[in-house]
Image: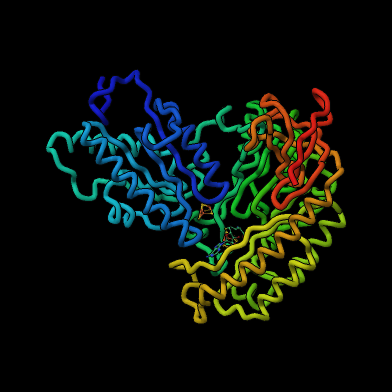
Amino acid sequence: MKDVRTGTRSQWQRKRVFIRTYGCQMNVYDSDRMADVLRPLGYALSETPEQADLVVLNTCHIRERASEKVYSELGRLRDLKSERRRDGADLTIAVAGCVAQAEGEEIIQRQPAVDIVVGPQAYHRLPELLARVARQSDERRFDGRRRPGAGVLDTDFPVESKFDHLPAPSEADVRAGSAFLSIQEGCDKFCTFCVVPYTRGAEYSRPATAVLREARSLVAAGAAELTLLGQNVNAYHGEAAPSSIGGSTWGLARLIREIAGIDGLARIRYTTSHPRDMDDDLIAAHGDVPQLMPYLHLPVQSGSDRILEAMNRGHGRDHYRRLVDRLRGIRPDLALSSDFIVGFPGESDADFDDTMRLVDEIGFASAYTFKYSRRPGTPGAGLGDQLADGVKAARLAALQSQLGRQQRDFNASKVGAVVPVLFAEAGRKSGQILGKSPWLQSVYVEGSADMIGSIVNVRLLAAYALSLAGEVVTGEGPSRLEVAA
Ligand code: SAH
Ligand code: SF4
Ligand code: F3S
């Protein structure tokens, strides 16, 4: 049987897919799962679009810049496709992720070289979509012209069908001892700046049994660390596992306690959590589940009550401060991280000062900072008093410098400590490897690549803005890293 896309390759030749991932960790997880769906169709992963038969852009719609990047990338892929066609071959282009969900048909109109637009809840149907494209491609070869609107579109909800139909994870889903596990998707909170409720749909929690099954497979496939993912991961309320005592649903804390019982699993993390969903049990879990790492990404967005209200966050600055006090009461070494948006419509100097004061009061170990980006369809886009880019840029710079100082101080506070590091990859300099501390700091040591994927004790020797240098204190004996000034 000939390959319907090129008509020249025989079937035993492997096909290649290149997947480019934009946006958050949920997209990273989804990209891996798309690779899992495509593998049985004969697709191996390709490192570049040039070597691929199928290119998937797994896109992010969160800020304007993120969306626009997709269209410039599609322009380059169109050229690659034209080249291929001149040579009698072809390239299939698929747009997945949140831009696909938000813009759907418009993508094909704006870039007719796109063959497939597939929303985040429809990845399990990729084989079917590819078959449809192949049929169209055959017809085109037959009559020699591209039919208008030839791209195929699938942006159907609901969320649960995706998880029910995705294959079990494999070793390919574990990277250097770490794996992501999506347990929750979607959002019902409707912050006034945010597109996620529109691109990912209503809040949905996977049943506990399905999550536990996947967690066990990932650990069996080599994961020492699991990061539980969700747009609002701590709003998790999945159907309880059978024969469990106490209620028909489990919260995140209950799920974490159960996952902590899996033999061989050393580290559990979760992201992204919402300050409104930190319940007592979850706070307690930070004190009594040793596998739960002492790092919490808990976005506050702003330190101004007025702006928090306009953002529809559902809590004020004092709620956030009290939460942090309780968490630190239970786990004093907890490293906190947050997202911040500066320049939300109507944000005054006084509002921004409130944010700077909150940052001072809390002390963050790391943070992500963004200029407000006006997103079509969100309530924020329609507000008056949109701020000039210059104002946003100045506030962003002030906030970043304050948070940068805090990150350096936090890193410096760990110098001299011996901490377990999970090594993830080769460092930039030869002979170096790079891993993560329990507080998610990047740590470099001199070490061999065979330590990648394992957890090794490291003495921290020097702190920098974004990383620490250390030396291994177990295993093959101490090895000293030359510390540059
Ligand atoms: N569910 C998470 C956040 C998901 S989006 C939460 O509630 O915290 C990731 C981050 O992108 C947000 O925390 C926010 O800081 C940022 N973000 C979202 N929409 C934005 C916009 N319109 N402009 C700028 N930043 C935005
Ligand atoms: Fe977006 Fe708010 Fe939902 Fe987070 S909680 S995903 S910021 S709407
Ligand atoms: Fe972006 Fe969608 Fe994630 S908009 S941040 S990829 S949920």
- Image coordinates for residue 163, horizontal then vertical, percent: 52, 40
Q: Residue at x 75, y 69 (%)?
A: 358
Establish if 182 lies above or below 51: below
Q: Is residue 189 visible?
A: yes
Q: Is residue 384 left or right of residue 364?
A: left
Name which quarter of the figure residue 54 lies in: top left
Q: Residue at x 55, y 29 (%)?
A: 172
- Image coordinates for residue 115, horizontal then vertical, percent: 30, 43
Q: Is residue 397 left or right of residue 84?
A: right
Q: Residue at x 60, y 48 (%)?
A: 184
Please state which of residues 70 and 220 is positioned toward the viewer in this rendering: 70
Q: Is residue 411 left or right of residue 214?
A: right
Q: How is the image coloured?
A: rainbow
Name which quarter of the figure residue 261 lies in: top right
Please state which of residues 88 and 416 is positioned toward the viewer in this rendering: 416
- Image coordinates for residue 410, horizontal then vertical, percent: 79, 54
Please state which of residues 452 and 149 is positioned toward the viewer in this rendering: 452
